[in-house]
Image (cartoon, rainbow, N blue to C red):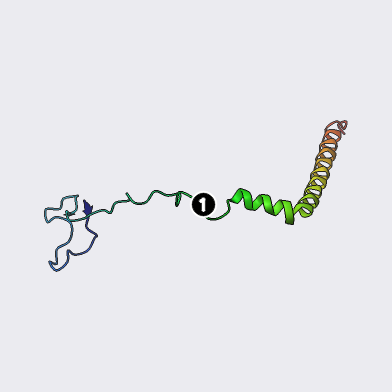
Amino acid sequence: MKPKSPGTISGTGETPWSEEGSAFPLIDCNYQTFSLDRFHGGGSAHNDGPSFLNISREYFRYEARRNFLAEGVFFLALVAILIAAFISGALAIVRFLQLPEA
């Protein structure tokens, strides 16, 4: 059952709340839900189109091998630069903390 929306009940001019000031709304007993029995998700039993794995495999085999390798090398170079910067910063902090007091 579904509670009626706030406002007036169609044609009667009454509010959906009972006249005695009860905290419960009047209920629409004719409310019917629909069934999801025919929906199973996942689509049909057989796949008509290529899978994502096959599409990505073909993409890397024919189109993007060199680009992927170049981007991988660039990424590794950036990681090496970041590691060098972190080590340099850590050494500077250690040297600063080992200075004698003035």
Q: Is residue 87 left or right of residue 29?
A: right
Q: Nearer the viewer, residue 28 or 69?
A: 69
Q: Residue 69: x and y, percent?
A: 79, 49
Q: Identity of the amino acid at label 1? A: Asn
Q: Is residue 96 left or right of residue 32?
A: right
Q: Residue 23: x and y, percent?
A: 19, 50
Placement of 7 over or under 57, stated as above or below:
below
Q: Residue 71: x and y, percent?
A: 78, 51
Residue at 67% across, 49% down = 57
Q: Nearer the viewer, residue 20 or 101?
A: 20
Secondary structure category for the residue under label 1:
loop
Picture quadrant of residue 85: top right
Q: How many marks?
A: 1
Viewport quadrant of the C terminus:
top right
Residue receiving disc 1: 47
Q: Residue 68: x and y, percent?
A: 76, 51
Placement of 9 over or under 82, stated as above or below:
below
Q: Is residue 20 left or right of residue 70?
A: left
Residue at 85% across, 36% down = 91
Q: Is residue 72 left or right of residue 101?
A: left
Query: For the residue carrying disc 1, how many other residues have a C-alpha within 10 Å: few (<14), some (14-19), or many (20+)?
Result: few
Residue at 79% across, 53% down = 66
